[in-house]
Structure formats: structure tokens, C-alpha cells
């Protein structure tokens, strides 16, 4: 339990620091936003951290996640957490998982279709790096 809480804290801290550094860079170089390019709460226009991941917000709805359903923009819901797996799609060792883009992939993650086994600790660690936020109702 403590390890999970520690991992969640560091994941959110990492996103906050990445966003803060990105914003500091924008301010230092005098970059600005016009009113037409200002970010909104829409999941498609969230600012990203220095790894290209959207900055975590309080939560995303299943409807918002469902808009991320292509191989160019693929998000999963797993255990009420939202993950941007776009960059991982070509590296998935078990084959094509793009049919799950924009959906709740909890059951597939917990019991792989190939053998029914859960994903490894290594897979869980890789997934943790792709977290963008919590699922909200």
C-alpha cells in the first residue's frame, strides 16, 4: 500500500515538475499564447510535460478517454486510472493492442487474452510511466 502511494506521489510530482519547467522555459523566452491558442479543459488540448505526456488533471471521464481512440492518440482506462499509451503501442511485446484505444482495458490488462495471466511487474511499471490522471464519473 505504501509503495503504491509513494509511486502515485512521485508520478504526480514528476508531472508537476515537468509542467513547471516547461512553463518557466516559456516565460524565460517570452513566449506567449494568443487567445485562440490558450489551453482549455478539453482533454485534447492539455499542456504536456517534457516527455510529451499531457499534464495530469484532477480526472477524466470515460467520454473524454473515448475521444483518444486512434493509434496516433491512444488512451486506456485501467483500474480507474487513465493512461496515454500512444508511444508504447509499437513496443508492446504481445502484439497489437490498438483495438482497446479509448476504452476500459482493465480486464485485458489483468488477464492477457493470450494466456489469461496478469501482466508482469515490469509491465505495471511501464504502465505507471504513462499515467495521465484518474477516471472520474
Image (spheres, helix red, strand yellow):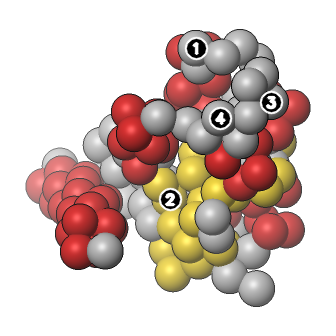
Q: CA distance from mark 2 to mark 4?
A: 25 Å
Which image quarter holds the C terminus? bottom right
Q: What residue is disc 1 on?
A: 93
Q: Nearer the viewer, mark 3 or mark 2?
A: 3
Of the image marks 3 and 2, the number of the one nearer the N terminus? 3
Q: Position of residue 22 (x, y in %)?
A: 25, 53
User: Which label sits on residue 117?
Assistant: 4
Q: CA distance from mark 1 to mark 3?
A: 13 Å
Query: Is residue 134 toward the left or the right of residue 44 in the image?
Result: left
Q: Position of residue 100 (x, y in %)?
A: 82, 39
Q: CA distance from mark 4 to mark 1?
A: 14 Å
Q: Is residue 14 above or below residue 130?
A: below
Please tell me in which quadrant of the rendered image residue 33 appears: bottom left
Q: What residue is disc 2 on?
A: 132
Please tell me in which quadrant of the rendered image residue 122 appears: top left
Q: Position of residue 72 (x, y in %)?
A: 71, 28
Which image quarter holds the N terminus? bottom left
Query: Is residue 10 toward the left or the right of residue 61 in the image?
Result: left
Of the pair 91 and 116, the residue shown nearer to us: 116
Q: What residue is disc 3 on?
A: 113
Does residue 28 show up?
yes
Of the image marks 2 and 1, the number of the one nearer the N terminus? 1
Amino acid at each position: 500500500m505504501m509503495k503504491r502511494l509513494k509511486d502515485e506521489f512521485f508520478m504526480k510530482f514528476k508531472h508537476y515538475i515537468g509542467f513547471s519547467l516547461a512553463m518557466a522555459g516559456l516565460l524565460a523566452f517570452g513566449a506567449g499564447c494568443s487567445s485562440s491558442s490558450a489551453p482549455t479543459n478539453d482533454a485534447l488540448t492539455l499542456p504536456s510535460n517534457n516527455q510529451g505526456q499531457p499534464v495530469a488533471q484532477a480526472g477524466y471521464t470515460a467520454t473524454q478517454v473515448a475521444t483518444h481512440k486512434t493509434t496516433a492518440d491512444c488512451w486506456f482506462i485501467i483500474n480507474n486510472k487513465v493512461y496515454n499509451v500512444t508511444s508504447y503501442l509499437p513496443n508492446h511485446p504481445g502484439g497489437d493492442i490498438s483495438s482497446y484505444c479509448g476504452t476500459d482495458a482493465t480486464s485485458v490488462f489483468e488477464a492477457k487474452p493470450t494466456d489469461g495471466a496478469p501482466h508482469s511487474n515490469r509491465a505495471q511499471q511501464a504502465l505507471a510511466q504513462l499515467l495521465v490522471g484518474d477516471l472520474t464519473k
